[in-house]
Amino acid sequence: MWEKLNKKFKKYPARMRVAKKMIELGLRLDDDNKIYCGDLKISDNSLANAADVDRRAIKSTTEIILNDSELSSIFKNIIPAGTLLKNIAKSLNLGVIEIEVGHENKGILAATTTLISSKGVSIRQAYAEDIEMGDFPILTIITEEPVPGDIINEFLKIEGVKRISIY
């Protein structure tokens, strides 16, 4: 998909920002040329502000997507990821682990969840950013309780882990 998007929007960075923002936020494009988050219609102005583009870039991007069967199929089937607990974890007495990973990150989720469970801590939620969406993708793990700080050195031994924050 990223190859196709890069090819379509190579000369149009504003359109690429719109497409990336739609994917990042889980926004789908419907046959009526409108953008939705679940069943909630998103205004062109709102998306333009979020993507930092002129609102006309929204229309031109959606038209290109709808006229390409492969991209249309992708963008018509995007769904939002649901509630992420990171920002409310402290209020719920949950732990948060953020792991910055490199592009060589095979097995990091398995290794980190194994480490966490070996400490007797249950995982409530895990969310990984798409490595194609940014230079430094983050794996966020929400645990049933805060994990001990001395586990940081063990995380840093996992191949591909660049940095870790626990709070």
Image: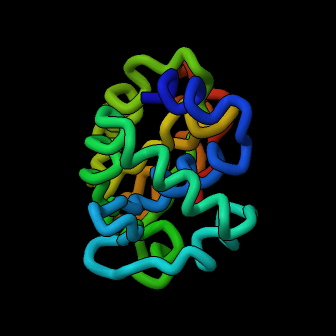
Q: Position of residue 50 (x, y in %)?
A: 65, 68
Quarter location, residue 94: bottom left
In the image: residue 152, left or right of residue 148: right
Total number of numbered discs in the rendering? 0
Quarter location, residue 27: bottom left
In the image: residue 73, left or right of residue 145: left
In the image: residue 37, left or right of residue 86: left
Residue 99 to residue 92: above or below: above
* Nearer the observer, 23 or 30: 30
Instruction: Name which residue lies at 32% across and 44% down.
Output: 72
Q: Position of residue 90 (x, y in %)?
A: 51, 77
Here the colouring is rainbow
Tell me the quadrant of the picture where the C terminus can be found. Answer: bottom right
Residue 166 to residue 42: above or below: above
In the image: residue 72, left or right of residue 147: left
Q: Position of residue 117 (x, y in %)?
A: 29, 41
Quarter location, residue 84: bottom left
Tell me the quadrant of the picture where the N terminus can be found. Answer: top left
Instruction: Name which residue lies at 28% across and 48% down.
Output: 120
Instruction: Name which residue lies at 26% across and 42% down.
Output: 73
Residue 116 to residue 8: above or below: below
Q: Position of residue 149 (x, y in %)?
A: 59, 50
* Nearer the observer, 75 or 57: 57
Instruction: Name which residue lies at 38% across and 80% down.
Output: 41
Residue 17 to residue 29: above or below: above
